[in-house]
Amino acid sequence: MPVLVNFKICDNSKDCSGITACPNKVFLWNALKKTIFFDNAKCTACGGCVSSCPVGAIKVAKNQKEFKKLKKEIREDPRKVSDLFIDRYGAQPLHKAFFISQDKFDEQIIESSKLVVAELFNDKSIQCLYCSIPIKDLFEGKDIKYRKVAIEGVALLERFNVVSLPALLFFKQGKLVSKIEGHFVPEQKLELDKKIKVSFK
Ligand code: SF4
């Protein structure tokens, strides 16, 4: 009874931190249905999973009353995943939930069943900190998995033939279907929007 997941703000992927955080294997990944599920009968309400989720989507209720209250809160939560995209295109990450190290690229992006947008950036590009476009403005309402990757060395650049940073790479079922390269200042947002629309086709 104790565990609830707010799937409105959870990108429901097999790299869910609850799967690794729970000592009782309550959280599991259904590879067939491509979804997280949890076996509450095994849960001891220890709370260990709650702090593991970087977007706060995991809740644990201590009793029936709290369970009902949390369920209502989730039901009434107006947010969606894209509301959590506080990062700015090309600039240093602001929300750790979407930032991954380069060695997690395949696991989180290539092996994902979702439409994934991977932003490659080089955090030394000061320019991006001051004039960059909010990711939320670019992907508002889009059902995507967004991840931000700090580029080290040339491996990923050569692998996807990227010549200028920052860059947005679009993956469907692990296949690169489109990419957008280079810095866009806020005045160029419409131009970038158009390129993104084309990338989603
Ligand atoms: S509360 Fe504890 S036992 Fe229950 S799912 Fe979370 S980590 Fe597992």
Image (spheres, grey):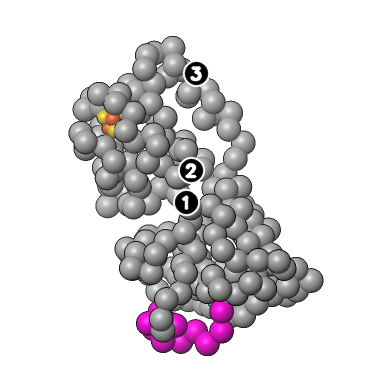
Mark 3 is surrounded, within 10 Å at the Cα level, by few (under 14), some (14 to 19) or many (20 or more) other residues, namely: few
- Residue bearing the label numbered 1: 97
Q: Given the image, on which type of amino acid does mark 2 rest?
A: Val
- The image shows residue 3 at horizontal and vertical percentages of 35, 28
Where does the C terminus fall, quadrant-wise?
bottom right
Q: CA distance from mark 1 to mark 3?
A: 26 Å
Which amino acid, mark 1?
A: Ala
Q: Residue at x 33, y 68 (%)?
A: 103
Residue 22 picture quarter: top left
Viewer can see residue 193:
no
Q: Which residues are magenta?
A: 155-165
Pointer 1 and pointer 2: residues touching (CB < 8 Å)?
Answer: yes
Say which residue label 2 marks: 55
Can you identify the residue that label 3 sits on? Answer: 69
Residue in the picture at 52% in, 77% down? 178
Among the 4 quarters of the image, the one containing residue 89: bottom right
Earlier sequence position, callout 1 versus callout 3: 3
Residue count near mark 1 (Cα–Cα under 10 Å), binned few <14, some 14–19, many ≥20: some
Instruction: Looking at the image, tell me whether mark 2 or mark 3 is earlier in sequence order.
Output: 2
Disc 3 is placed on an element classified as helix
Image position, residue 67 (x, y; %): 42, 19
